[in-house]
């Protein structure tokens, strides 16, 4: 594989109170307390996982699922 773009889906897990990032193509599942922390975690581990699969030039895209808005009280 060369120059592959992997999508990592980020969603808010209300019950656990964390952001979860998942990519079936990379066999990646990780979590963090903030979206920014999840981004940092994904950018740290995803290239290593891709390299183990022989794709050292892979790129990554984090796609967030919609988060329901809650009105302020």
Image: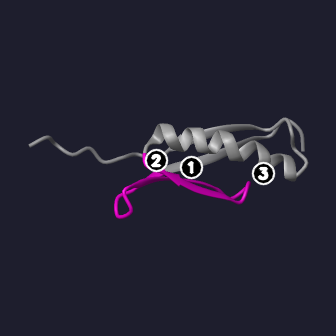
Q: Crowdedness of circle 1 by 10 Å Cα count: few (<14), some, many (20+)?
A: some
Frontmost residue, 65 versus 21: 21
Count of numbered circles on the image: 3
> In the image, is 56 to the left or to the right of 27?
right
Looking at the rendered structure, the secondary structure element under dot 3 is helix
Where residue 58 sits, quadrant-wise, is top right
> Is 15 a magenta residue?
yes
> Is 72 a magenta residue?
no
Task: Answer above or below: position of 17 versus 37.
Answer: below
Contact? badges 1 and 2 (CB < 8 Å): yes
Contact? badges 3 and 2 (CB < 8 Å): no
Locate residue 29, reporting x and y percent: 61, 58
Task: Answer above or below: position of 40 versus 29.
Answer: above
Secondary structure mostly seen in magenta is strand
| Mark pair 1, 3: CA separation | 16 Å
Q: Which residue is mark 1?
A: 9
Locate residue 32, reporting x and y percent: 49, 50
Locate residue 52, reporting x and y percent: 86, 52
Q: Which residue corresponds to the image point at 91% horizontal and 48% vertical from the top-left?
A: 54
Where residue 14 sits, quadrant-wise, is bottom left
Tag on residue 65? 2
> In the image, is 54 to the left or to the right of 11?
right
Looking at the rendered structure, the secondary structure element under dot 2 is loop
Question: What is the quadrant of the C terminus in the image?
Answer: top left
Q: Which residue corresponds to the image point at 56% horizontal and 39% vertical from the top-left?
A: 39
| Mark pair 1, 2: CA separation | 7 Å
Badge 1 or badge 2: first in the primary sequence: 1
Question: What is the quadrant of the N terminus in the image?
Answer: top right
Q: Which residue is mark 3?
A: 49
Q: Which residue corresponds to the image point at 85% horizontal and 35% vertical from the top-left?
A: 57
Residue bounds of the magenta highlight = 11-33
Badge 3 or badge 2: first in the primary sequence: 3
């Amino acid at each position: 594989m060369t120059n592959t773009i992997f999508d990592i889906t980020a969603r808010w897990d209300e019950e656990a109170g964390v952001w979860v990032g998942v990519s079936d193509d990379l066999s990646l599942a990780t979590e963090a307390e903030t979206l920014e922390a999840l981004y940092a975690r994904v950018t740290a581990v995803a290239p290593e996982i891709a390299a183990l699969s022989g794709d050292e030039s892979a790129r990554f895209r984090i796609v967030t699922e919609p988060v329901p808005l809650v009105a302020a009280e």
